């Protein structure tokens, strides 16, 4: 059954709100009246994108994704309940009952409704792609097929938490340099538009030949005054056009192939995707998921479409009877260290632990690279902004220093 969010008042006039399951809006109102509540608003929490008239519900287009922390918490709760032999639909109901927000409760109840309609957990999650990413749904599907759903859910919770921590660490480290760059650029633009023109009038009125740096500053100031709005509109249009271009799967694949094969970003991109792939594959293999299914699920975890395509080619080769080492070597996209560890793991019969060690090593290398890069960003931004400000100051001061010569002329 679908979930409905409601607002209602009781007999004393006290307002309340929440989420409940019902066959339709009328049934939801009847349930509220049975609870001695007067419904003031009853809305389905998950409306279809197209309405009965073929239009588009704009609220669906701008729906927010579920935060990493909320997704991790919900996943861990479901994993704990399912591990205690509680059926998945009952686990979803219990987690929804204690969800922090009505939106999360409604989302979980709608997933539960899909399961009650006879669909699998992964298929029900597929109705909410904005909330549950592709790698999440693929891992759940593999866990269901192998009967190891609790272990897979526990891995997903750890994976989402780890990714969220890494993203937060990088964002916090880059916050100060980003603010510094924005403030500096804003101040320079204001100087070019409002201050430099008044100073330039004094120099131009003298009729003297100005230094090259000053003439360049005057031209830049005139450009901002005359075409500032056009430049801003052009930047916004370029950003919108880029987003539209990248949304097309073929174009996104080309861009991802460029990232995975072009220096200097290729090394970092390959390690990042290999770490995702190896970590997920290690957990799935240790959860006794069949290797081909585990490879397909792990491929869905990799964010780079080119690497994902090569990983799925590895799964196809393994299905044909080739070893995992052979498939990864032929893919020619994974680090040699990972391939070597996979070879040793296959020969020793301990593929899962070997993949786990490889993923941990790749993660450590990535963390070191990110830490080094972030440590270099702040002084680089300071030097760049300081250099630009120095050039602007010199462009203004040079004519002032030669002011006596200008007056004499």
Image: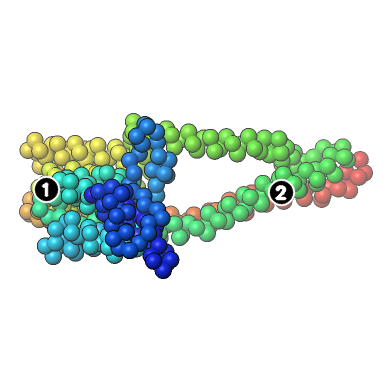
Query: What residue is at 84 percent from the left and 39 percent from the top?
Result: 204
Left or right, 138 with respect to 253, comes to left
Which residue is outermost to the right? Answer: 408
| Viewer-closest of 234 and 77 | 77
Going by the image, does 210 lie left or right of 76?
right
Vertical position of residue 272 compared to residue 151: above or below: above
Which mark's residue is nearer the viewer, 2 or 1?
A: 1
Question: Measuring 52% from the left and 59% from the top, which residue is drawn there?
Answer: 176
- Whether residue 3 is visible: no
Q: Secondary structure at mark 2?
A: helix
Label 1, secondary structure: give it: helix
- Measuring from the top left, give residue 153's x and y in whole percent: 20, 57
In the image shown, does 332 or 92 lie closer to the viewer?
Answer: 92
Residue 229 x %, y %? 64, 37
Q: What residue is pinned by disc 2?
A: 191
**Residue 13 lies in what quarter of the image?**
bottom left
Which quadrant of the rendered structure holds the C terminus?
Answer: top right
Crowd rating for badge 2 (residues with CA inside 10 Å; few <14, some 14–19, many 20+): some
Q: Is residue 18 above or below residue 294?
A: below
The colour scheme applied to this rendered structure is: rainbow
Which residue sits at x=48%, y=56%?
A: 174
Query: In x, y percent, where is residue 230?
Result: 63, 34
Q: Is 235 left or right of 166, judged from the image as shown?
A: right
Q: Residue at x 21, y 47 (%)?
A: 114
Q: Answer with mark 2 or mark 1, whichever residue precedes in sequence.
A: 1
């Amino acid at each position: 059954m679908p979930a409905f969010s409601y607002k209602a008042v009781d007999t004393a006039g006290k307002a309340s709100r929440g989420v409940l399951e019902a066959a339709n809006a009328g049934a939801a109102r009847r349930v509220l009246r049975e609870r001695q509540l007067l419904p003031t608003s009853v809305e389905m929490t998950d409306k279809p994108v197209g309405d009965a008239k073929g239009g588009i519900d704009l609220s669906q287009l701008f729906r927010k994704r579920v935060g990493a922390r909320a997704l991790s918490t919900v996943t861990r709760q479901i994993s704990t309940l399912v591990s205690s032999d509680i059926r998945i639909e009952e686990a979803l109901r219990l987690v929804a009952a204690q969800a922090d927000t009505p939106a999360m409760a409604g989302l979980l109840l709608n997933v539960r409704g899909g399961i009650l309609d006879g669909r699998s957990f992964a298929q029900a999650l597929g109705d909410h792609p904005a909330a549950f990413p592709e790698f999440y749904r693929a891992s759940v599907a593999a866990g269901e097929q192998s009967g190891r759903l609790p272990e897979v859910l526990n891995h997903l919770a750890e994976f989402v938490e780890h990714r969220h921590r890494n993203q937060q660490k990088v964002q916090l480290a880059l916050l100060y340099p980003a603010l510094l760059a924005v403030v500096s650029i804003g101040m320079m633009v204001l100087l070019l538009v409002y201050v430099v023109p008044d100073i330039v009038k004094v120099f131009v009125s003298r009729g003297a030949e100005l230094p090259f740096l000053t003439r360049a500053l005057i031209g830049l100031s005139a450009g901002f005054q005359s075409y500032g709005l056009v430049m801003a509109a052009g930047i916004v249009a370029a950003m919108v056009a880029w987003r539209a271009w990248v949304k097309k799967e073929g174009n996104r694949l080309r861009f991802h192939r460029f990232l995975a094969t072009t220096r200097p970003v290729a090394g970092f991109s390959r390690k990042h995707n290999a770490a995702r792939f190896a970590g997920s594959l290690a957990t799935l293999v240790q959860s006794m998921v069949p290797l081909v299914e585990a490879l397909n699920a792990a491929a869905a975890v990799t964010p780079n479409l080119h690497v994902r395509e090569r990983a799925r080619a590895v799964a196809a080769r393994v299905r044909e009877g080739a070893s995992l080492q052979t498939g990864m070597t032929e893919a020619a996209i994974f680090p040699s260290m990972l391939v070597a560890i996979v070879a040793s793991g296959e020969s020793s019969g301990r593929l899962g632990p070997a993949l786990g060690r490889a993923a941990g090593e790749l993660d450590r290398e990535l963390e070191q690279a990110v830490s080094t890069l972030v440590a270099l960003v702040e002084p680089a931004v300071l030097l760049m902004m300081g250099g630009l400000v120095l050039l602007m100051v010199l462009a203004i001061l040079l004519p002032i220093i030669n002011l006596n010569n200008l007056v004499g002329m």
